[in-house]
Image (spheres, helix red, strand yellow):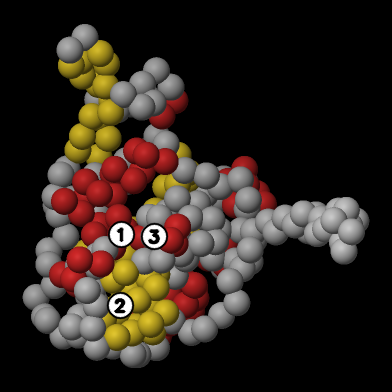
Amino acid sequence: MTETVTGTAPAAPTETAKTRETDGRALVASLAKDGMTIAVGGFGLCGVPYDLIEGLRDSGAKNLTIVSNNMGVDGQGLGILLENHQVSKVVASYVGENKLFAKQYLDGELEVEFNPQGTLAERLRAGGAGIPAFYTATGVGTLIAEGKPHAEFDGKTYVQERGIVADLALVHAWRGDVDGNLIYRGTARNFNPLCAASGRITVAEVEELTPLGSMDPASVMTPGVYIDHVVTADPREKPIEQRTTRPRPDASGTAAEAGEEK
């Protein structure tokens, strides 16, 4: 297994003014370049920066390394980049919902680096915090640990993992102010704060853009110092990977007939 692009901690933005209320797709299309390592927030289809991913698709940038928990599904989320053959390497924890991903991997078009989910999260966090590497017991004795440095602490073997610093990070938040301070909603938080901190350049799309000083500082989950550009996301219907329903009781209290919709 090869190592992901790593380096020193991303520098804080030198300018205080952030891009605001602009077209997120056009912005990302202007930032994306061939060969970039790009960290993308989201988990499944939850908390995914859809507009920004579409901008990445529109950029036509090729030979991309995508770092994300998963690669979306066919035709949704990061799956649209696979359709466009823009991705050469994926660093992820789970890819089982994407048939096109499996085909491209088996055809030798994609290089894949699997990470345990907690390890991937810590690699992103470490990169954002300026930590070049760390040791973990997770994966020792498995394929994941092959070719990586090992060390023993207190009689237990650990494997070294490298921090991830992305050239570009794309994240989605529920609410953000014009200085890039972000609040996530529920489980849509997932990998977004970690990706935001790991990017040398970070673009955040928000459902609600608010004036500076309008948010309770104690509620801020990602400080604006990590964000270079903040844009308003287009309203869209939330895609659902698998929708499961259960029978509703009829007037007598007996469950009416119903099935599963997936």
Residue at (50% x, 51% y) in the render: 70
Q: Which amino acid does label 1 sit on?
A: Pro
Residue at (23% x, 83% y) in the render: 214
| First of labels 1, 2 by sequence position | 2
Residues under numbered marks 2 and 3 in contact, where contact means CB atoms less than 8 Å apart = no
Which residue reaches farthest left?
A: 14
Q: How far apart are marks 1 and 2 (CA)?
A: 13 Å
What kind of element bears circle 1?
Answer: helix
For the residue pair 86 and 114, the one nearer the viewer reads as 114
For the residue pair 33 and 144, the one nearer the viewer reads as 144
Residue 60 seen = no
According to the picture, the residue beneath numbered tag 3 turns out to be 189
What kind of element bears circle 2?
Answer: strand
Percent position (x, y) of residue 12?
12, 67
Which label is found at residue 193? 1
Image position of 119 (left or right of 11): right
Q: In which quarter of the image is residue 172?
A: bottom left
Q: Of circles 3 and 1, which is in front?
A: 3
Identify whether 67 is placed above or below 118: below
Q: What residue type is labelled 2?
A: Gly
According to the picture, the residue beneath numbered tag 2 turns out to be 176
What kind of element bears circle 3?
Answer: loop
Q: What residue type is labelled 3?
A: Arg
**Label 3, residues with CA under 10 Å away: few <14, some 14-19, many ≥20:** many
Residues under numbered marks 3 and 1 in contact, where contact means CB atoms less than 8 Å apart = yes
Q: Of circles 1 and 2, which is in front?
A: 2
| First of labels 2, 3 by sequence position | 2
